[in-house]
Image: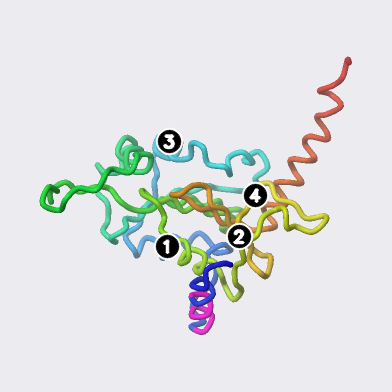
Amino acid sequence: MFSSNVFLFSFIFWIAGDLSARIGEKRGSLEGRLLKSNGIVLRSDEIVEERQTGMPYLDYEAFFPKPYEVRLYFKSSDGTRPKQDQLETKNLKLAFDRKTAPKKPLSTINPTEKKLDGWELHVLYIQGTSVLEVYKKTNSITKQEQNFLLALQSGKSFWTESTSANLPDGKHSALGFDFSRADHYLRAKIISSRSMMFFRTQTDEFFYNSLMKEREEEAPESIKGF
């Protein structure tokens, strides 16, 4: 049974009436909110390329409708604005890809050693509108944080645990998913213990159909000559 906390958060946000799903937002609205929270845009080509390594959405980049843009952001866990030297590729890589260090007694921690902790956000914009978002944390996402992320993307609907095996005939998924919104507008996938991806159902099915079309067109040529 899916955690009742998600339904609680969704109900609270629905009553409040001041929160719409993040997917479907224009870039200006999303960035405006993030920058007010001391989030920053990762602009270095080197950093962006490094941080995109292994991201599942890149498998379908050839099918991204144009015009599109992928932007990466970083927001610290405590709300402070990170220093520029903390955002060098090496430091970001260590922050996000390091193995979880064993906990040390508080008395042994040097208070001047500020560890880079926070969230990386990848957003795929199609014609300036968000259609896919990846939330990646420097350490494991807690169950409570997962529930809040789902609630942020719940809109006026709610989430259920579901996979592509539950899809009816004629419906497909390229990216795969672990959660589906009841109104069928969004799907969500747990990529790892540290990252979670949200995306429009329409976008997911478009990727699948585009891939199948490409394979059908390539098949005759690939076996030609046998």
Name the element at disc 1.
Answer: helix
211 in the magenta segment: no
- Density class for disc 4 (Cα within 10 Å; few <14, some 14-19, many ≥20) is some
Name the element at disc 2.
Answer: strand
Towards the viewer: 208 or 126 = 208
- Report the quarter where the C terminus lies: top right
Amino acid type at mark 3: Glu
Residue at the disc numbered 3: 50
Q: Is residue 18 left or right of residue 65?
A: left
Towards the viewer: 40 or 77 = 77
Q: CA distance from mark 3 to mark 2?
A: 28 Å
Q: Position of residue 14 (x, y in %)?
A: 54, 80
Q: Earlier in the sequence, mark 4 or mark 1?
A: 1
Amino acid type at mark 4: Gly
- Placement of 214 over or under 113, stated as above or below: above
Residue extending farthest to the top is 225
Q: Position of residue 23 (x, y in %)?
A: 56, 62
13 in the magenta segment: yes
Residue at the disc numbered 1: 145
| Point 34% across, 63% down: residue | 37
Name the element at disc 4.
Answer: loop
Q: Is residue 32 left or right of residue 172?
A: left
Q: CA distance from mark 4 to mark 1?
A: 21 Å
Q: Position of residue 77 (x, y in %)?
A: 32, 58
| Point 61% across, 62% down: residue | 161
- Report the quarter where the N terminus lies: bottom right
Residue at the disc numbered 4: 176
